[in-house]
Image (spheres, rainbow, N blue to C red):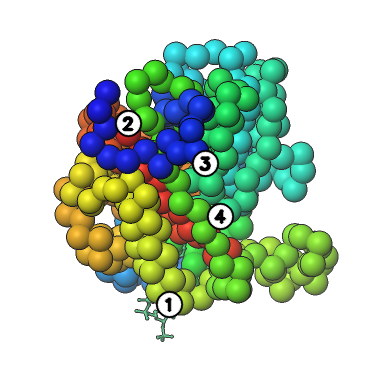
């Protein structure tokens, strides 16, 4: 095989294995909340939401449907595509900001549900960037030959931390889950690189004040609506465009690739205007972009995972294609991954 790009992993007398995504799957809840529904809940309009964000509807999990339930369904679909059984899974990583509960971690709850008895299990919290962070962590175990099969999931029930009286935020988010099986696939480069970054100085742009050690749940904290997410929209927007652009550029630079070589770009599905601004700076065309935020809104860590599954199912990504995922989230965090599919 003579690659027409650089594999940044292949340095320092690289003796590791490459890591490919051998299966993907997703799940979104059945209930649809449209912009028209939101018009009845807060002072907003379909026209405002579509023109400012591109979102038309989002999915809401049922009252008795939790992050681990959605994660489990997405995982089942990814396992089917990869052709593996639960006993083959060595490690489960769940990226989420809406775990079923503070502990135990949601990955353990998924482990129980799919009966992956041999698997270690932990969660990653990097907000909307979580899936790329989890991919990169999972990849390290495959590359080092520590594990053969890693299940990576991005799953969120954001409706549980959304303030449904705050029109600034409630129109943006939705629920869902996406999953990937990581394994070595001989003669494939798989995950070529994953850029990860963070800027804790901007932690206050997007956060949930309550529920942690700083502000445990009390009657007062609940009354003060501390257990819902808060966001400075405009600043978050600006930082998102800049961070996603730079992460994507760095990922391309490491692989010595030009943007035109990327068959499919899967950006974090937060806002159509953010995606368009990043694409314009990168010189990417509309045909390269995969977008499903009109149907799901921003599902945080699940966002690019669901989009990857849908892009594969739609035939937009074929074996051997180069794809790029690029993400941004609270923290602030960001990331970009280049994958030979
Ligand atoms: C939230 C966001 C859509 C707002 O868009 P914007 O272009 O910054 O907003 P504008 O300046 O055009 O409008 C703000 C006005 O709209 C109002 N507004 C906010 N939400 C509204 C809604 N759902 N319906 C109607 N009006 C709304 C505001 O109250 C404000 O009114 P004011 O000027 O009278 O105070 C945008 O900032 C954004 O997407 N930010 C990033 C959010 C994000 O992606 N977060 C997750 C990152 S992972």
First-in-chain label (4 vs 1): 4
N-terminal of the pair, mark 2 or mark 1, is 1
Q: Residues within 10 Å of mark 1 (few under 14, many from 20)?
A: few
- Rendering quarter of residue 140: top right
Task: Report the residue marked by disc 3.
Answer: 136
Whether ligand 1 has any atom under 8 Å from the Cβ at mark 1 is answered as yes
Label annotation for residue 234: 1
Q: CA distance from mark 4 to mark 1?
A: 18 Å
Identified at 32% across, 31% down, the residue is: 341
Residue 265 falls left or right of residue 75: left
Q: Which mark is drawn over residue 341?
A: 2
Q: Nearer the viewer, residue 282 or 251?
A: 251
257 lies left or right of 269:
left
Q: Position of residue 19 (x, y in %)?
A: 46, 29
Circles 2 and 4: CB distance less than 8 Å? no
Nearer mark to the viewer, of 1 and 3: 3
Total marks shown come to: 4
Q: Secondary structure at mark 3?
A: helix
Between the residue at mark 1 and the residue at mark 3, the CA separation in whole angstroms equals 29 Å
Q: Where the N terminus falls, by quadrant?
A: top left
Badge number at residue 127: 4
**Proximity of marks 3 and 2: CB atoms separated by less than 8 Å:** no
In percent of width and height, residue 52 lies at 32, 70
How far is the residue under mark 2 from the one under mark 1? 35 Å
**Cβ atoms at labels 4 and 1 below 8 Å apart:** no
Mark 4, ligand 1, within 8 Å: the answer is: yes
- Left or right, 220 with respect to 111, comes to right
**Residue occupying the point 49% across, 67% down:** 169
Say if 12 sits above or below 157 in the image: above
Q: Residue at x 49, y 64 (%)?
A: 170
Is residue 123 visible in the rendered image? The answer is yes
């Amino acid at each position: 095989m003579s690659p027409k790009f650089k594999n940044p992993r292949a340095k320092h007398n690289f003796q590791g294995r490459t890591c490919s995504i051998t299966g993907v799957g997703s799940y979104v809840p059945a209930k649809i909340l449209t912009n028209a529904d939101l018009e009845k809940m807060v002072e907003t309009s379909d026209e405002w939401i579509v023109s400012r964000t591109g979102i038309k509807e989002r999915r809401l999990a049922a009252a008795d449907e939790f992050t681990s339930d959605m994660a489990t369904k997405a995982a089942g679909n990814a396992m089917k595509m990869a052709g593996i059984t639960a006993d083959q899974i060595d490690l489960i990583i769940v990226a989420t900001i809406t775990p079923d509960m503070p502990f135990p971690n949601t990955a353990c709850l998924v482990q129980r549900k799919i009966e992956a008895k041999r698997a270690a299990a932990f969660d990653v919290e990097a907000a909307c960037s979580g899936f790329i962070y989890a991919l990169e962590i999972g990849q390290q175990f495959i590359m080092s030959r520590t594990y053969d099969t890693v299940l990576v999931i991005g799953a969120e029930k954001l409706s549980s931390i959304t303030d449904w009286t705050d029109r600034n935020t409630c129109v943006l988010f939705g629920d869902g889950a996406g999953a990937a099986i990581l394994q070595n696939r001989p003669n494939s480069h798989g995950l070529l690189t994953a850029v990860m970054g963070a800027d804790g100085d901007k932690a206050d742009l997007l956060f949930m004040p309550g529920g942690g050690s700083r502000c445990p749940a009390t009657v007062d904290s609940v009354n003060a609506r501390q257990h819902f997410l808060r966001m400075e929209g405009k600043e978050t927007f600006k930082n998102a465009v800049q961070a996603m652009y730079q992460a994507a550029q760095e990922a391309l630079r490491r692989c010595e690739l030009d943007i035109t070589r990327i068959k499919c770009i899967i950006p974090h599905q937060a806002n159509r205007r953010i995606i368009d601004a990043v694409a314009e700076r990168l010189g990417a065309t509309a045909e390269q972009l995969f977008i499903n935020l009109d149907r799901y809104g921003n599902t945080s860590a699940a966002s690019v995972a669901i989009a990857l599954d849908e892009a594969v199912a739609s035939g937009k990504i074929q074996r051997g294609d180069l794809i790029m995922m690029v993400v941004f989230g609270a923290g602030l965090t960001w990331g970009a991954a280049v994958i030979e599919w």
